[in-house]
Amino acid sequence: MSKTQIATGGIADDAVTAAKATGFGKIAQAQTTVTTTTSSTSSTSFTDVTNLTVNITPSASDSKILIMLGVIIRVMSQTSEGNVSDFQVLRDSTSITQFRLGNREANNEQRDIHTSGYHILDSPSTTSQVTYKLQMKKVNGDQVQINDGSKQSHITVLELLA
């Protein structure tokens, strides 16, 4: 069977629909949570960041979920150990990534603020609702805090179809 090429100028605008487009990833849906709530902990065990949770129900079991975090993090210390904090992203109760932030300067009395952006690609392999959330804990120092006053953090998830 021979194929005929048609110049793109000869294709009607409504002739190609999203349903006919194949061969590249499509965003099926997006969910986001934005919070200005201040959340802090002095715990050395992971605790949930208040109001930084998002739910998504994948439409296909082979979909990927792109998780995007934009977080205002403050680590505080007046100790000789400096200030170091760990974070993790959970899918339901499973940790899918961890990261560490901090300043190891001794007796640093300043409150170090980090504006951090993270992108994680997950394969939940389900069509049931999944919940993504951020957790934090201190490693060294006095306290770790998300947001401060009117600052805002967000978690956004995109379902990417195969």
Image: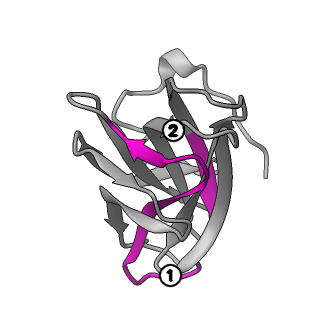
- Give me the C-alpha separation between circle 2 and circle 1: 25 Å
Give yes or no for contact between labels 2 and 1 (Cβ–Cβ under 8 Å). Answer: no
Amino acid at pointer 2: Val
Amino acid at pointer 1: Ser
Residue 29 in view (yes/no): no
Q: Which residues are magenta?
A: 118-147
Disc 1 marks which residue? 93
Name the quadrant containing residue 80: top right
Q: Is residue 71 magenta?
A: no
Q: Is residue 119 magenta?
A: yes
Sequence-wise, the earlier of marks 2 and 1 is 2
Residue 83 in view (yes/no): yes
Callout 2 secondary element: strand
Residue at 40% across, 84% down: 128
Q: Is residue 161 above or below residue 90?
A: above
Q: Is residue 152 left or right of residue 71?
A: left
Q: Nearer the viewer, mark 2 or mark 1?
A: 2
- For the stretch drawn in magenta, the main secondary structure is strand
Q: Nearer the viewer, residue 14 or 87?
A: 87
Q: Is residue 90 above or below residue 20?
A: below
x and y percent of residue 112 in the render? 52, 27
Q: Nearer the viewer, residue 58 or 44?
A: 44
Name the quadrant containing residue 122: bottom right
Residue at 46% across, 37% down: 73
Callout 1 secondary element: loop
Q: Is residue 41 left or right of residue 109?
A: left
Q: Quadrant of the C terminus?
A: bottom right
Q: What is the total number of numbered labels drawn onto the structure image?
A: 2
x and y percent of residue 18 in the render? 42, 47
Disc 2 marks which residue? 75
